[in-house]
Image (tube, grey):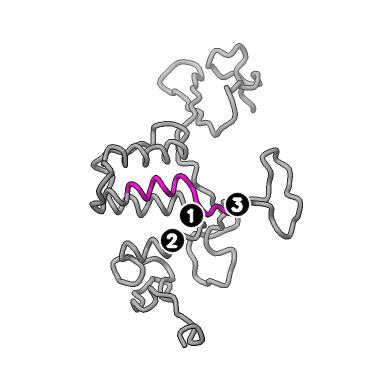
Amino acid sequence: MNYGDTGADAILEANGDNIAIPGPGTYAIKLYLHKPDYTYGIELPSFDHRLPFFTQGQSLEINDVSQFTEGYAVAKFTNITSAGTVGSDLTFPDTDFPMFRLADAYLMYAEAVLRGGSGGSMSQALEYVNAVRRRAYTDASGDITEAELTLDFILDERARELLWECHRRTDLIRFGRFSNTSYLWPWKGGKPEGTATDEHYNVFPIPASDIG
């Protein structure tokens, strides 16, 4: 049986009219069981929109790195124009790759302040970080406090904001997390459970022909 809301009185009726919503988005519909009839409410919950993962047909855990269906796929970049049409070439996407972004500069500022750099302030760093998060959440529900603004938070926020933009390896090296055992992830060091790697991997090799 289908339920709708004839009369827009927040009460569901069998075969009622479609429920009107104020605009596009992902809504949560709540049924208030402690109230009479079938009273309901519609909310547009705030959440971090930086979740570019494709999960359909994918498993979360990776047991075989050669299997594409193991692990969530990332769909951050799509070959779709702002008008919703496909790009001009289906083999080579038209999507511009971001080299420098304002959000990256904001997070750099906050990291520099947290590392003791002069010329900045914690209040400004917090404002910049929350500006990045307000764009991601579309409102202030994701704001953090000054007490929550730490270097560990910055490392995690850079992972969320700059996913697949070629920053993670350099970030982990700068934070001292790339090669040691204090920060493991699945398949680090070629092991399913993750393992430490030698510190010489922190530096890219220089070809002997360039040295000589």
Q: Residue at x 43, y 61 (%)?
A: 168
Assess whether residue 135 is covered by the magenta stretch.
no
Crowd around label 3: few <14 · some 14–19 · many ≥20 (10 Å):
few
Please tell me which of labels 2 and 1 falls first in the chain: 1
- Residue 208 lies, with reference to residue 79, above or below; the image says below
Residue 79, position as x, y percentages in the image: 68, 50
Residue 119, position as x, y percentages in the image: 27, 45
Image quarter of the N terminus: top right
Judging by the rendered image, the residue that carries numbered circle 3 is: 77
- Which circle marks residue 71 in the picture? none
Q: Are marks 1 and 3 in contact (CB under 8 Å)?
A: no
Residue that lies at the very extreme toward the front in this rendered image: 212
Find numbered disc 2 in the image and state the secondary structure of the residue it sits on. helix
Label 2 and label 1: CA atoms lie apart by: 8 Å
- Chain part drawn in magenta: 96-110
Which residue type carries mark 3?
Phe
Judging by the rendered image, the residue that carries numbered circle 2 is: 168
Q: Nearer the viewer, residue 177 or 51?
A: 177
- Which circle marks residue 163 in the picture? 1
Find numbered disc 1 in the image and state the secondary structure of the residue it sits on. loop
Label 1 and label 3: CA atoms lie apart by: 11 Å
- Residue 114 lies, with reference to residue 126, above or below; the image says below
Which residue type carries mark 2?
Arg
- Residue 69 lies, with reference to residue 5, above or below; the image says below
Q: Residue at x 49, y 48 (%)?
A: 101
